[in-house]
Image: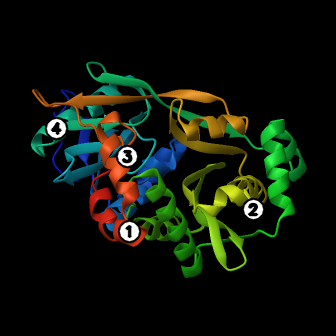
Amino acid sequence: MNAPFAPDARAADTVTRVDLHNAGEARRITAFVEEQGGSPFHLPSWLNAVERGAGQKACGLLAERAGRITGWLPLTILRSPLFGRALISSGFAVDGGILSSDPDSEARLAHAAGELAERLCCEEVELRGGTVPSGWDAVTGKHSGFVCDLAEDDEAQLLAIPRKQRAEVRKSLQGELHVTVGADEPDRAAHYACYAASVHNLGTPVFPRSLFDAVLDGFGERADILTVWDGDAPLASVLTLYHQGIAYPFWGGGVWRARATRANERMYYALMCHARGEKACTRFDFGRSKTGSGPWNYKKNWGFAPEPITYARWSAPGAAPRDVDPTSEAYSRKIDLWKKLPLPVANAIGPAIARGLA
């Protein structure tokens, strides 16, 4: 670990920057994350996967008292010629922020994050979860999260879906579609094809495939890909993380035919059953969506209640707020132009841009 940030008057209280490539430190932090009920995006394995797959450096600040961990702040050091420099907690994720066992450790970590940002010439620190530190800006109302308990069996899960959406799921079960689950090369290739087509249709650059590969490799049995097929053609696919009894379907998408064939309905219902039956999950985290958007309404149709999400933001003196939200009005024209690119061209140039969309 590096030298402490802003040493406390009490010599036993420290905040240090952690080397996440140190296996022993990574294990200590992982145990603390699980003890505090953190998300998979707080884990060193997530940060290291992002570094390997997207080239954005893994980092973290650790608060300790007499050698015992009292707080942890996972960070990705984002450097992009298009989107500037920032510390993100956590990069390429929908959660993060400070985990602490006491308010004092939380305050020391927040102060150290601002100090680290200044040392690294970063314009901003963004915390995507947890409480908002004193003196930081709160960003709320833009996005909502969707989490719900899983039912006790497949039939109960089907009946838990509101009537109109349940009818769509039943229709998807009557067709010729079939489902596979795995993390081998055919699974990865099918997933990337579906995801790349999906984000292209939305007008945004696709992440590099190396990011998905790194997450799957880093999480092992705690991640997999579920794909819906029509014969040999993949129609919809989702990469899911499993952490402390919660399923996190994180990167999902489908080709144009997915809607007409109800492949997405088949996919998410199959995933709910798989998460409970094979992964012993009791909850399903449907992720975040922009409030009022199409995906926001789609998740409500499944019976999930939207919960407003609050992010915390620290900005360097004089720095203008970064805007990297692809749903922002500022990007509407660029999104329209991106949709018109041929898919092979978008897939070729998109990853270089998307590496900065942490």
Q: Earlier in the sequence, mark 4 or mark 2?
A: 4
Viewer-nearest of labels 3 and 4?
4
Q: Which residue is mark 4?
A: 123
Q: Earlier in the sequence, mark 3 or mark 4?
A: 3
Marks 2 and 1: CB-CB under 8 Å? no
Marks 4 and 2: CB-CB under 8 Å? no
Residue 68, given in percent of the width and then of the height, sits at: 38, 42
Q: Amino acid at mark 1?
A: Asn
Disc 3, SS: loop
Residue, x 29% and y 22% (percent of image)? 137
The circle on residue 90 is 3
Q: Is residue 271 depicted above or below 183 in this figure?
A: above
The circle on residue 347 is 1
Residue, x 75% and y 53% (percent of image)? 269
Q: On the image, which quarter does residue 352 sit in?
A: bottom left
Number of marks in picture: 4
